[in-house]
Amino acid sequence: MGTFMKRLRYYVPNVPTGFILLIGILIAYTGITPILNPEFYDDGVDSSWMWVMCEAFVHHMKWGKDILWHYGPLGFLYGRGYNPDTFLLKNICWFYMVTVYVAGCYTLVMRSGERTTPHLVAIPMLMLFAAISYETAFLSFPVLFLVYSFFMRARQSKLLLYLLVGGMVISSLTKISYMMLSLVILLLVESFRMICLKERPYYIVAYVVGWLVGWKLCHQDFTLIPAYIHGAMQHAHGFAESMQLDITASLHYPLFVGGLVIIWALMASIWFPQFGKEAWVPLLGIAYIFFAATKIGFIHNNNYHILEASAVFILVALTTRDLFWEDLSERKQYIFMFYCMGVAIFITLMSMSQEGADDRKELKKMFSDVDPKNPLSGKSNEAHFKEALEKIRSENPLPQVKGTSDMLAASQAVLLAHHLAYKPRPIFQGYHVFTSYLAEKNKAFLESDQAPDNLFFKISQVTKRYTSIEDAVSWPVILTHYDPQKFYGTGLEHRVLHLTKRDKPVTYSFKTIRQVTAKWRDKVDVPSVKKYGLVWVRIHVEPTLLHRIVTTFYRAARVMMEVETADGKKQNAILMYGTLEDGFLISPEIKTADDFKALYGKDPVPPARDVVSISLFEKGLKMYAHHLFEPKVEYTFEQVVIHR
């Protein structure tokens, strides 16, 4: 403990002022941030990726010609619709990028010698593999890297480094986001080296060139790059507008991360003064590790990921080894290392047994015709591609209709496989419509002259949400602007209702029935369908300040609804918090395309589908939900009046 106490006494004179300032910033930050935080409940949607998909798909991607630059070399197997013509070129570019990326990481480590800073940065670079994916086997990389950094002078350490490089290659070939996000930190590190150490790492240029070439090969068009940026800006604007807040509210997340960086800057200047001008580099590394640990352990909110988080926090403790490592005996050092390696191996085995099973089955199925003695045997990529399209067409028969078409379900591949003139809504998958702004965009599109001539409607429960909650405000528009025609396909999964656009649409309006104020779990009676017809409900949930503070640092809970129907059955369904105030059709409950057609009044909806009562509660934050805050819930029930 002697060396540790000496260093601690050295740091003590620097602590008081900085510590007080740090506490002040934390108090102010935790007090202001929840007020700006518009996300009180989780809708289970990756909003930024939703915009990327919509922008790329609607405006740029051509089916059968382009490859959406998202998957690794085996991506087309999972996509089941990408044309394999550019598959070989894509793989060549991909391997080139992986080689350059790994060479950069390897060079960074080998040139660093015994300096601590590059290691603290290299660790979070490897941490990316564990933080942004469910492939938790990658968590072993930073652990092994730490072990290597402790014994880098040992002859055996080179073997460990080669294993790490091989693991990085495999993981980088799995998913592009490992490489894209790692590039950010890699650029930060190498920019620091160019400025402070006067070195010129040319492989950064090679990496960027390879990335651009790969983009060109797969997209044919560089305009998709600004489309991604435009999509992110649209999301930020819509997010703020939907919450009726100033545009700065949409900057909550970057402000939150920026605040963490500032806080860590103060801590780095206090606790790591020996780094001097290099203090910001370990700051970024340690900050990212904490961020990744928080994301893994507290956002996913289950024991499996909390175990991962505990391992990450051990890594954070070990990165501060300059404070205590020299005081430990060799035996205790080995105990530390073997403990970390044990955690890494345990998590790796867990991930191998629990995750990736579907991928393995898919690969086995796709290559079932390959002779083990002749890996080049079996069907070509082209044959697999044609088989996939034929399977879609056989399972989902559709007519060859005139004009443009859209699909109101997460089954866009069906329209494309039938070579119909696809004219999608701005947010083409209903389960991604999670704010008022997005809902209004789709609604306005269906009301405009640009609306498709044909709609194919089917119920698809992607995430066990209440069926009428997805694209809810568009349902009255469909009922007044389109006429039902015929059903196609059999079974709940494939049965589709074909609707055609009316020459002269009718109008609709809402008539208030009653308003009710309640709390979580309070049962609220729903007006009778027999008396009022179609019943619409708007719900306003007012979280407490404590709730906002908790959800700033912890994953927001999902809003759930218990539904009781006239036949006495009860079920739980997920709601979309961002669109609750716009409302949705609560009764009758629509479970099939046949039920939706019955809304036109030509066939009666089964009486058993009438909803008699509902109650709201939240799933998640179990230890807090029922004790620390009870939000007020306001229900407004309305009658949907269609003026035929």
Image (tube, helix red, strand yellow):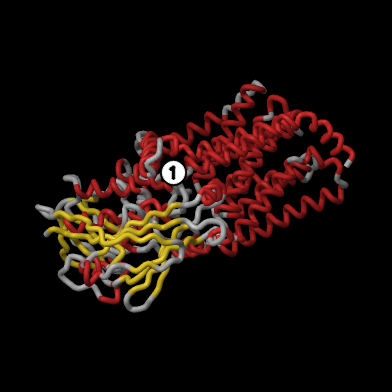
- Considering the image in quadrants, where does the C terminus appear? bottom left
Inspect this view and state whether residue 120 appears.
Answer: yes
From the top left corner, tell me how far across and down residue 182 is, in percent.
56, 39
The residue positioned farthest toward the bottom in the image shown? 567
On screen, residue 254 versus residue 493, left or right, reads: right
Q: Can you see residue 108?
A: no
Q: Position of residue 553 (x, y in %)?
A: 57, 47
**In the rendered image, which quarter contains the N terminus?**
top right
Q: Is residue 349 left or right of residue 336?
A: left
**Pointer 1 local density, CA inside 10 Å: few below 14, some 14–19, many at least 20:** many
On screen, residue 628 versus residue 49, left or right, reads right
Residue at the (48%, 48%) spot, across then down: 72
The image shows residue 326, relative to residue 484, as above or below, that is above
Could you tell me residue 399's position as x and y percent? 19, 61
Query: Residue visible at 75% across and 40% down?
Result: 320
The mark tally for this picture is: 1
Residue annotated with mark 1: 90
Q: Position of residue 258 (x, y in %)?
A: 55, 35
Q: Nearer the viewer, residue 112 or 332?
A: 332
Quarter of the image holding residue 518?
Answer: bottom left
Q: Tell which residue pokes out farthest to the right in this image.
A: 2
Q: Residue at x 37, y 38 (%)?
A: 237
The amino acid at mark 1 is Lys
Residue at image x 22%, y 64%?
Answer: 497
Front residue of this view, candidates 249 and 626: 626
SS assignment at label 1: helix
Q: Nearer the viewer, residue 328 or 589?
A: 589
